[in-house]
Image: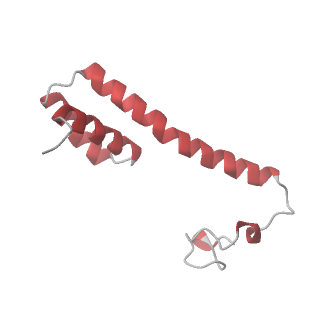
Amino acid sequence: MSELKSREKSLVALGAAVASNCVPCVEYHVPVAKKIGLSDGQIKEALQIADKVRRHPARMVLEAARARIAEGQNSSADAAGSGCGCTGSNRGAGISGVS
């Protein structure tokens, strides 16, 4: 037996859809939320809260990037340790050939 009611599950699903930037999920879950009785105002509030939560980590990433720029030319990729993993190796060509 689920502890969450369908309205609560719907709000969680809306939050997850926004947080994961999934347009098909949002397009699916908004009508479902309306169908189970959530008002437009409740849906909008849930989306607004989810967007605030989603934006915080994105802002932190941007601030980290700006801080790295501010450190100047003396910093190198070696300072990042073993690398970020998006290039498939610790060193090499980087993303799209950018080194």
Q: Position of residue 76 (x, y in %)?
A: 79, 67
Q: Position of residue 62 (x, y in %)?
A: 63, 46
Question: Which quadrant holds the N terminus?
Answer: top left
Front residue of this view, candidates 93 and 34: 34
Front residue of this view, candidates 60 and 91: 60
Q: Residue at x 87, y 63 (%)?
A: 74
Q: Residue at x 17, y 28 (%)?
A: 34
Q: Residue at x 82, y 54 (%)?
A: 71
> Is residue 95 shown above or below 58?
below
Color style of the picture: secondary structure
- Check the image and name the residue furthest to the right: 74
Q: Is residue 75 left or right of residue 65?
A: right
Quadrant for residue 12, please give it: top left
Front residue of this view, candidates 53 and 99: 53
Q: Is residue 40 left or right of residue 92?
A: left
> Is residue 83 shown above or below 46?
below
Q: Residue at x 21, y 38 (%)?
A: 4
Quadrant for residue 91, please give it: bottom right
Total marks drawn?
0
Q: Position of residue 61 (x, y in %)?
A: 61, 49
Question: Which quadrant holds the C terminus?
Answer: bottom right
